[in-house]
């Protein structure tokens, strides 16, 4: 998804799709900063030169005091060592949430970044347009992982495992799926499409926003951990919940 937002031409990075559901200019600068640092981290650079961010913002006519205010007010999201910046765990979670909102067309884009010297504008009445085009909304799509064997001959199937523990909500389904994949199948790495495949296997309705559901399971329950959506694993709290609290 980050490749939809940023365009990288021989190392020269610019904003390609600015529809990141910002509500104002300052909100946009904060969101694009988090996404840019996340993009760089996934590309292998966890420490990003401040000058790189300045260049990105300058190209979009956004380099002003707003970024300094954002960095000073959000040390919990970004470590600011003057010459370089680095995402903290909470900043990574916020970036992942922004990404999920980017793909959710039920969320209006409240502020628009204009190009070619045009003035950036606050978008009004977008909700009306969204209501008119509900039938045209794109849904988040994931692919079933065909190589994932959820009915192994020598181990308990995912369906039987879930019946044994009787999950009551999406949080518990997410936990059981990750636990089963990691502890029973020894599957690594576990990504969001693995969980999508599990939902399909057991015939459970997939959460409308699976991406956010996984983040909420991690943040609200502490049952799973993830460095990103391509590497999800069960936490000790999650292990204890499955092994001691969910047994029938």
Image: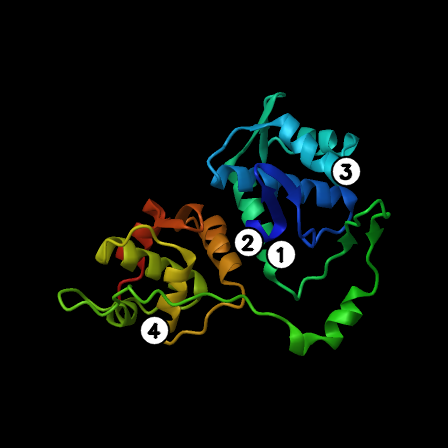
Comparing labels 2 and 4, the label whose residue is closer to the camera? 2
Return the mark for residue 102: 1
Residue lying at the far bottom of the rendered structure: 135
Q: Earlier in the sequence, mark 1 or mark 3?
A: 3
Distance Cα–Cα, label 4 vs label 1: 28 Å
Locate residue 146, reporting x and y percent.
32, 67
Query: Disc 4 on helix, strand or loop?
Result: helix
Would you say the residues marked 1 and 2 are in contact, meaning their CB atoms lie under 8 Å apart? yes
Distance Cα–Cα, label 4 vs label 3: 48 Å
Return the mark for residue 84: none
Check disc 2 and report the residue beneath it.
Answer: 1
Between 129 and 163, the one nearer to me in the picture: 129
Q: Earlier in the sequence, mark 2 or mark 4?
A: 2
Residue lying at the far right of the rendered structure: 119
Locate residue 173, reporting x and y percent.
39, 64
> Where 219 sits versus 83, above or below?
below
Check disc 4 and report the residue beneath it.
Answer: 202
Check disc 3 and report the residue beneath it.
Answer: 62
Locate residue 4, reporting x and y percent.
59, 53
Residue pictured at 68% horizontal, 62% vertical:
107
Determine which quarter of the picture holds residue 38.
top right
């Amino acid at each position: 998804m980050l490749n939809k937002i940023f365009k990288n031409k021989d190392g020269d990075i610019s904003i390609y799709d600015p529809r990141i559901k910002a509500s104002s200019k300052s909100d946009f600068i904060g969101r694009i900063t988090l996404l840019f640092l996340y993009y760089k981290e996934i590309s292998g650079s966890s420490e990003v030169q401040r000058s790189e961010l300045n260049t990105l913002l300058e190209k979009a006519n956004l380099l002003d005091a707003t970024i300094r205010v954002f960095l000073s007010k959000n040390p919990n999201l970004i470590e600011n060592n003057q010459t370089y910046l680095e995402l903290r765990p909470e900043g990574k979670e916020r970036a992942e949430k922004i990404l999920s909102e980017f793909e959710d067309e039920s969320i209006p884009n409240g502020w628009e970044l204009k190009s070619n010297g045009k003035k950036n504008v606050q978008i009004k009445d977008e909700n009306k347009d969204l209501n008119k085009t509900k039938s045209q909304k794109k849904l988040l799509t994931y692919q079933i992982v065909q190589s994932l064997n959820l009915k192994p001959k020598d181990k308990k199937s995912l369906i039987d495992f879930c019946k044994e523990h009787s999950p009551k909500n999406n949080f518990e389904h997410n936990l059981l799926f990750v636990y089963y994949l990691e502890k029973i199948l020894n599957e690594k790495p576990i990504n969001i499409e693995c969980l999508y495949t599990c939902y399909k296997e057991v015939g459970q309705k997939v959460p409308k926003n699976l991406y956010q559901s996984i983040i909420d399971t991690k943040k609200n329950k502490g049952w799973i951990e993830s460095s990103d959506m391509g590497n999800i694993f069960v936490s000790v709290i999650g292990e204890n919940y499955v092994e001691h609290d969910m047994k029938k």
